[in-house]
Structure formats: C-alpha cells, structure tokens
C-alpha cells in the first residue's frame, strides 16, 4: 500500500523552517522598568541566526535573473552568519560557496562554514573596508576570478532588507497583535532594521525604531551628523558596526541610534543566557544593553521588542570563556570583591591546609610541595590555628625532635577571616596589619585563603 504523504506533517526541505521565530517575554532583565520587554529570538532559525532569512532570497533572485546557473559559486564577505545562511541554501540547491571573513571572527564560525563544505578565506580585521586586503575587497576579487559566480553582496543587495520586510516585520506585527511600540536591533548591514522598520512604520508610523551601534563604529555619528571621522577603531563584538555606511541601511526608518561598549555587550549576553535562559551571541548583548538604556527612559507600559540575532554557541571560545573575558578586561566587576580576586588565583588549589594532629614534617612537606609560606590549621570545618614556614624552620633547627611534634604544639592563632563578597579593600586592610594571610568565607563556610602575595600579584596585573 502506498503511503499517504498528506498525513505526514513535514517541511519540504530545511529552508522552509526559516523564520517564524518565537517572541519571548523577558522576565528578569528589565525587571522594575515600566515597559514590557520581549525578545525576538533568531537563534531558532536552522543556521542559528537572523541571517538565514536573507540567504535564500539572495540566491533565488540571482537564479531568476540568470546570474547564477547550476554548478555556480556563491561568494560573500561575511562575519559568519550570512555565510551560514547562504551555505544552507547552497547545500540544498547544490552550489559551491567561498566566504571571506575578518580574522577577529570566532574560530567556531570558520569551522561551521567549513562543515557545510564552504571555502573560507580569512582576512585582516584592522584594515579599512576599501583596502585590497579587506574582506569585502577580497570577496570581489574572488568573483572576478571565478566563472559562473555571484557576489551575494549583503551590504548593497536590496534582497537583504526585503527579506525582513516580508518576514521579520510581519511576524513581529502579528506576534504583538499590532501593539508593538518600539522595535530595537543592532546595526550591521542595516538590513534587519531597514526592512523590519519600514514594515512596522507602514503599519503604524508611531512605532519607534531604535538602532544600537557598538562603540568604535561610525554609524551613530553618521546618523546624527551625516559625517564621520576617518579614524578607524576596532572593537570585539562580531557582526555589527561599520567603518562606512552600507548601501542597504535606510536611516529614514530609524528614529534614534544608541551606543554600547564591548564590555556592556558581552556582560549582557551572559546575563541573557544565565538569567533568561536564552543563549545568545555578543550582538544580542549589544541590542539588549541598548534596549535597556532606551527603555529606562520610558514611563509607560509600552511594548518593546528587541531582536536577538544569533546563538551563543559560536562564541564559546570568547564571550563564554572566562579566560578570554579576563584577558580582554571585560570581566572586571565595578566593585572588586574578595571572591573575584580569589577566583583569579593562579596555580595553587584554593585551600591547602594541615590538621592539628599532623606532624611538623608533614607541614613542611606541604609548604614545599605547594610553594607557599604559611598554612591554615583546620579541624573539621573549623580553622583552629596557623603555621608559618619561618617559625617551623626555626623550631626544627633549634630542636630536630620538633619534626615529629604535632602541629597543635607549635601553631599560632588562626588567620583572620574576611567575607567573600566584601570589597577586596577589606582583605588589604587586614593583610597590612602584619597578618600574612586571610581566610575567605561565605555563609560560614571556608572557601579559600588569600595571602599577601596573592593580593600583590593581583594588584600588579
Ligand atoms: C551576529 C550578528 N548580529 C547582528 C547582525 C546585524 O544584522 P544586519 O546586517 O541585518 O544589520 C549581523 C549581521 O551580519 C550579525 O552577524
């Protein structure tokens, strides 16, 4: 008996799963402010980003116009996500892809594109966009040198904003029952804001459309002055900001542009993940941080929709890697706590200690093994004393039998305690009163030890 396909609920291919992403209420971020905050979560697209929406439109237009023929090659300068959107469509339709990417982009993105069979050419980030080495110029050269190839050209291709005009805008309008008051998104090519903004303003001209620009980009300055300084500044957030004004960016649909730093972006991306459970990339943090700055100025229960462009998975080696965050000085809290300095200690396990019944010999062994100068004496969960290397040395030198004496017979009072969430200045005050170390505790439990050396090492960094 032949099967009845009409009874099977399926998509005809992966491309038809693009779009219709969920609108999710933000319950914690923005708590306490008047407007109601919603996120349009674009990581639900099959390629994990908003850019899936534009890949297929660009390819089908080139097919219709006869510029792309079977066996052809799709070339694009991409921060990664547009490449992936194109690569998915190219896989389904049987085209080859070549992508150029600036070297600041995460390794995950390069691997992703290669996983789809694309060739990826990595170019320097710190060059102006008109330099022959820039990712946009290298992409143009590849097209010139490759027969039957097209440049997807997201920065100038009207199909980019059109995709948002025909999908993102209508989805948001319907999902909010036409009640949206403010639409907020970060600016890259400007395709998302231009297409979505145009659609929403055609429905209701009172809707305010706000662009968020990373610090270092020229777009905000250009929006306000129609000029921009030629000084090129780099920043770490990926996929957004420019050193020129892309052809698809239509500022007539934008009411304001707000600036956000890398640090604000990355810390907010981590908050979206940890507080709302929405795993996002850095540009979502930029959009959200800007949205909060804007929403804080609103005093009504307006509906605010923030578009979160992509998933956090492609930034595991950066935004979600504490070492990278610390190296780039993004993880320094405004108020440095004892806990923060303790967590940055290098090498030594957090709490090396000795039992009061253990021998002096054992304590000296521990001191030399861990290359420390003092030890807390701990019994059960309680710190009952302390020993210092110089005292133990003097004791065994004057009487070698001390090697086998119990620590309890030679120990001094326990090191003072500080609370993990106190400012580091508190630990410094105690250490400067001749105590060689402090014990760090949280809710009456010992967490670790901070020595003078640890704090001096932290300060010198
Ligand atoms: C991660 C990420 N966020 C945001 C954007 C910006 O979207 P648009 O180019 O539509 O302005 C991009 C664009 O490449 C992106 O890759």
Image (tube, rainbow, N blue to C red):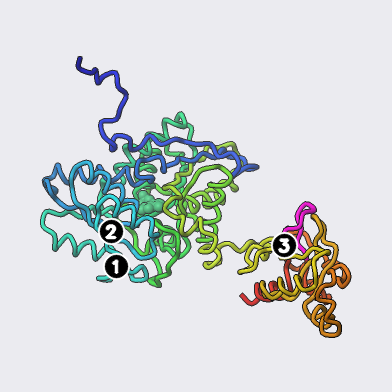
Q: Quadrant of residue 315?
A: bottom left
Residue 250 is at least partly visible in this image: no
Image check: 46 left or right of 99? right
Measured in 3D between alpha carbons, the distance from the residue under mark 2 to the one under mark 3, in whole angstroms, is 49 Å
Q: Position of residue 81 (x, y in %)?
A: 34, 51
Q: Position of residue 377 (x, y in %)?
A: 80, 65
Instruction: Give the camera-side residue of 139 and 65.
Output: 139
Query: Is there a contact, CB below 8 Å, between mark 2 and mark 3?
Result: no
Picture layout, residue 393 above or below residue 66: below
Assess disc 2: are there few (<14), some (14-19) or many (≥20) residues with their C-alpha within 10 Å of its C-alpha.
many
Image check: 67 left or right of 168? left
Task: Identify the secondary structure beneath mark 1.
Answer: loop
Instruction: Look at the image and give the residue range highlighted in magenta.
Output: 439-447
- Identify the residue under disc 1: 134
Q: Which mark is residue 77?
A: 2
- Residue appearing at x 33%, y 40% in the figure: 165
- Identify the residue under disc 3: 448
Query: Is there a contact, CB below 8 Å, between mark 2 and mark 1?
Result: yes
What is the residue that sits farthest to the bottom in this orientation? 398
Image check: 33 left or right of 38? right
Query: Which numbered disc flags the more N-terminal residue, 2 or 1?
Result: 2
Instruction: Give the camera-side residue of 53 and 421.
Output: 421
């Amino acid at each position: 008996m032949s099967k009845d396909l009409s009874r099977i609920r399926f998509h005809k291919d992966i491309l038809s799963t693009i779009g219709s992403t969920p609108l999710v209420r933000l319950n914690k971020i923005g708590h306490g402010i008047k407007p109601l905050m919603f996120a349009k979560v674009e990581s639900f697209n099959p390629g994990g980003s908003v850019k899936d929406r534009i890949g297929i439109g660009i390819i089908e237009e080139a097919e219709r116009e006869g510029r792309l023929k079977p066996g052809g090659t799709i070339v694009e300068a991409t921060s990664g996500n547009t490449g992936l959107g194109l690569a998915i469509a190219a896989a389904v339709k049987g085209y080859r892809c070549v992508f150029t990417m600036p070297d600041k982009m995460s390794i995950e993105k390069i691997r992703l594109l290669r996983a789809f069979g694309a060739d990826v050419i990595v170019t320097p980030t710190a060059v102006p966009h008109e330099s022959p080495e820039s990712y946009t110029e290298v992409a143009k050269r590849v097209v010139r040198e490759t027969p039957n190839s097209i440049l997807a050209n997201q920065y100038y291709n009207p199909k980019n904003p059109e995709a948002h005009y025909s999908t993102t805008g209508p989805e948001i309008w319907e999902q909010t029952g036409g009640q949206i008051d403010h639409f907020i998104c970060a600016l890259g090519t400007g395709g998302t804001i231009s297409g979505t903004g145009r659609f929403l303003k055609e429905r209701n001209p009172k809707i305010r459309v706000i662009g968020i620009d990373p610090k270092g980009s020229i777009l905000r300055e250009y929006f306000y002055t129609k000029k921009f300084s030629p000084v090129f500044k780099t920043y770490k957030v990926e996929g957004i900001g420019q050193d020129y004004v892309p052809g698809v960016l239509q500022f007539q649909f934008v009411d304001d542009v707000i600036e956000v730093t890398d640090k604000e972006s990355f810390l907010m991306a981590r908050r979206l993940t940890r507080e709302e459970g929405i795993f996002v990339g850095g540009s979502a943090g930029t959009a959200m941080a800007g949205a909060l700055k804007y929403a804080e100025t609103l005093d009504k229960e307006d509906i605010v929709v923030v578009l979160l462009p992509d998933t956090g998975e492609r930034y595991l080696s950066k935004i979600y890697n504490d070492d990278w965050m610390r190296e780039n000085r993004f993880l320094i809290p405004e108020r440095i706590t004892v806990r923060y300095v303790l967590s940055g200690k290098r090498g030594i396990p957090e709490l090396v200690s000795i039992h009061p019944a253990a021998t002096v010999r054992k304590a000296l062994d521990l001191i030399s093994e861990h290359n420390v100068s003092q030890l807390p004496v701990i019994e059960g969960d309680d710190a009952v004393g302390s020993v210092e290397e110089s005292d133990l040395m003097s004791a065994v030198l004057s009487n070698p039998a001390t090697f086998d004496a119990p620590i309890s017979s030679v120990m001094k009072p326990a090191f003072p305690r500080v609370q993990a969430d106190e400012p580091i200045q508190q630990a410094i005050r105690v250490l400067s009163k001749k105590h060689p170390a402090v014990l760090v505790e949280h809710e009456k439990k010992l967490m670790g030890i901070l020595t003078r050396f640890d704090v001096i090492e932290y300060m010198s960094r």
